[in-house]
Amino acid sequence: MPLIVGALTLLGCRHDSSKAEATFSSDDQRPNFIFLLTDDQNYHTIRELGNKHIFTPNLDKLARRGMSFSHVFNQGSWEAAVCGPSRKMLNTGRHLFKTGYGPPTAVNDQFRGPLLGEILQQNGYDTFITGKWHIDEDSLRRSFTSGRNVFMPLGMGMSFHEEGGQFNPLVADYDGNDLNVENFTTRRANKFSNELFVDSAIDYLKNRKNISEVPFFLYLSFLTPHDPKHAPEKYLKMYPIDDIPVPDNMLPEHPFNEGDHNARDEVLLPFPRTELRIKWHIARYYAMVSHLDAEIGRLLDYLEKSELEDNTVIIFTSDNGLANGQHGLLGKQNQYDHSIRIPLVFAGPSIDAGVRKTGMFYLHSLFPTILDIAKIEAPKDTDSVSVAGLLSGNQDHVRESIYGAYKNLQRMVRTRSHKLIYYPHIEKTQLFNIVNDPLEMRDVSGDKDNEILIATLFAELERLKVEVGDPLQNENPVESFYEYKKDDYYPKRWPRRELNL
């Protein structure tokens, strides 16, 4: 036991760093916010931040103008649609099993507290949404003063290819009058989703000229680069398949059944994965990101020409990452970094420019951070901590350890040097030295020299499970999780596609 405690101390994974105070100006003018949320965009998709195979001039400019973080994490999911729980954590500031928006059968899910937009409204902000919500209608009505071209149905996460995909999304408006029966009347937009949502955001900003004394929170939530892999032809031509490098950690198939081996995301391409198909998949993914970047640039250009830029904080991030062939996987239903790490950039007044930091915090830390910047006290039952103190000064990170979960199939603990993934159904452990092996290609759990480290990380994982309200017991993963999500007794599987069919 002393050895384990000593190792834990050396790893520094016992406690979070103390919360730093925000350093924003003390005048009475509260900042505006433009919150840009993409869908399924992993952390390695911005040229300025390290990927020289993708073209993102506008996000590059934003990163140079502001502060970026390399290690920001989605905490996990209780279902295959990872983006749903991610957004529920983001808008409540609570951990995965405490959002109040878990499955109807979740016996340990907390009551529903106030949402981010709701709190901002109560403190004098005008709040506006365009794009994807992926929570229920009542929560949208509570969160936003108004909305334009909101993706429908509200609880849906994607626009399917056979229903128009990115080129013809189903949308509706909300005028803030809860007695208006015309609210949420659906229509087909007949316009690419990125362009449609940015049009709505710019129109909203143009109307701000008449009420500029009221601060605003603009929540612009894109459908891309989530599949279907649609992009205008101009952007598809930017990425010839022959120019796309194959990921170093690409595999024809994941070496073991990680739990949802035939989940929907995983059967978008057949097994075994081939280099040509993965290159095609990545080329289209990059094309979507580049078109997304161009539309974000259009919004930022308008903001720069307006009188709003000097007092507007811009936040760019995504809900979760995506594998795109790494480890033989396509989706985000796993605990590898490509699927749990996301990009995050802050830019605006009192934020250091051109700075990159580690971060080591969860995506839902944005909930108290935005409130902190707006000088609003977060609810007492907020689980995540504000990272406003990182936006200036020398502090580099917040947490020393990160927890992750997927259904009752996977659990993860990560420090800045190592990651342990445990698969309770098959009693399998993986250990990666992510300093020497950032692509998580060599499992070192079998090395005898790592026995104490593994025990240390398992102890930390159990501590974090208590912190986040995780009901799962390693020795009994089915029954212990059953009362949280009863319909997940058997993982939902889709027909497996073989390459030779």
Image: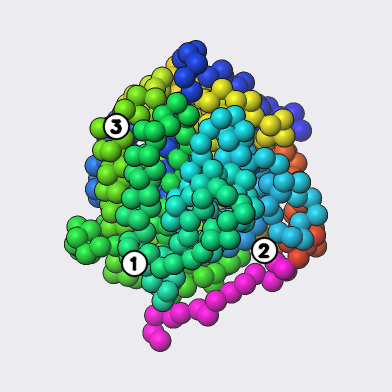
Q: Three-letter amino acid code at disc 2?
A: Ile
Q: Three-letter amino acid code at disc 1?
A: Asn
Question: If you read the primary sequence from the N terminus, does the residue marked by circle 1 or circle 3 appear first?
Answer: 1
* Residue range (magenta): 487-501
Q: Three-letter amino acid code at disc 3?
A: Ser
Give me the disc on residue 306. 3
The residue lying at 45 percent from left, 40 percent from top is: 218
Question: If you read the primary sequence from the N terminus, does the residue marked by circle 2 or circle 3 appear first?
Answer: 3
User: Where, quadrant-wise, is the C terminus in this rendering?
Assistant: bottom left
Give me the disc on residue 190. 1
The residue lying at 76 percent from left, 65 percent from top is: 486
The residue lying at 72 percent from left, 46 percent from top is: 112
- Residues at discs 1 and 2 in contact (Cβ within 8 Å): no
Q: Is 182 left or right of 456, judged from the image as shown? A: left
Residue density around tag 2, few if under 14, some if 14–19, many if 20 or more, within 10 Å = few
Q: Is residue 59 above or below residue 8?
A: below
Q: Position of residue 334 (x, y in %)?
A: 54, 57
Q: Position of residue 460 (x, y in %)?
A: 68, 38
State the residue in front, 333 or 418: 333
Marks 2/3: CA–CA distance: 57 Å
- Give the quadrant of residue 475: bottom right
